[in-house]
Image (cartoon, helix red, strand yellow):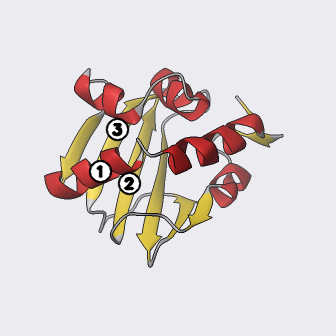
Amino acid sequence: MTAFLSADWFAALHGDGVELDDCTIEITVLGAPDGDVKWNVEVSGGRMAAAAGARPDADIVVTLPYDDTVAVARGELAVSVAFMRGRMKTAGDPGRLLDVLAATARPEYDAARATLSAATEF
């Protein structure tokens, strides 16, 4: 099992064939057990990779409380629902944000999320 939000978890959060234009996303998780966590996702050429740390050049910046981040990772809360309920704060390019929200509604996203969740220790 991989610890949630650990370096190994970020390394496992990757994929090919991502149907999303190239973009970068910085995510801040507030109130994690060891304090706030910043990480980032880069989508380039249909490939997605994640890494620990801030991304100052991010197209989109997202901030979520820890409990909601866990719920998203487990599939208990859709990313778009967190956004619509105001639980997820965002900044940056609104068009790209809508593209990302649409991508998280695809079955491929949910399958990849479920696979990673099954291998994650929360």
* Whether residue 51 can be seen here: yes
Compute the Cα span from label 2 to label 1.
5 Å
Left or right of 80 in this view: 68? right
Q: Residue at left 62%, top 48%? A: 112
**Of marks 2 and 1, which one's residue comes earlier in the chain?**
2
Calculate the distance from the C-alpha at mark 3 to the C-alpha at mark 1: 7 Å
Image coordinates for residue 87, horizontal then vertical, percent: 31, 24
Q: Residue furthest front?
A: 107
Counting other residues with Cα less than 10 Å from the Cα at mark 1, is it few (<14), some (14-19), or many (20 or more)?
many
Residue type, mark 1 in image: Val
Residue under label 2, please give it. 26
Q: Determine whether the residue tagged by mark 3 lies in a helix, strand or loop.
A: strand
Q: Which mark is residue 63?
A: 3
Verify CB contact (< 8 Å) between mark 2 and mark 3. Answer: no
Residue at left offset 51%, top offset 21%: 67
Pick out the residue farthest to the bottom.
Answer: 45
Which residue is identified by label 1? 61
User: Is residue 13 shown above or below 78?
Assistant: below
Q: Amino acid at mark 2?
A: Glu
The kind of residue on which mark 3 rests is Thr
Residue 96, picture quadrant: bottom left
Visible residue check, residue 93: no
* Residue density around tag 3, few if under 14, some if 14–19, many if 20 or more, within 10 Å: some
Distance from the alpha carbon under mark 2 to that under mark 3: 8 Å
Relative to 58, say whether 87 is above or below: above
**The residue tagged with tag 2: helix, strand or loop?**
strand
Q: Which quadrant: the N terminus? A: top right
Q: Which residue is found at the position 34% from the left and 38% from the top? A: 63
Label 1 element class: strand
Q: Disc 3 vs disc 1: Cβ atoms closer than 8 Å?
A: yes
Residue beneath the point at 37% across and 64% down:
20
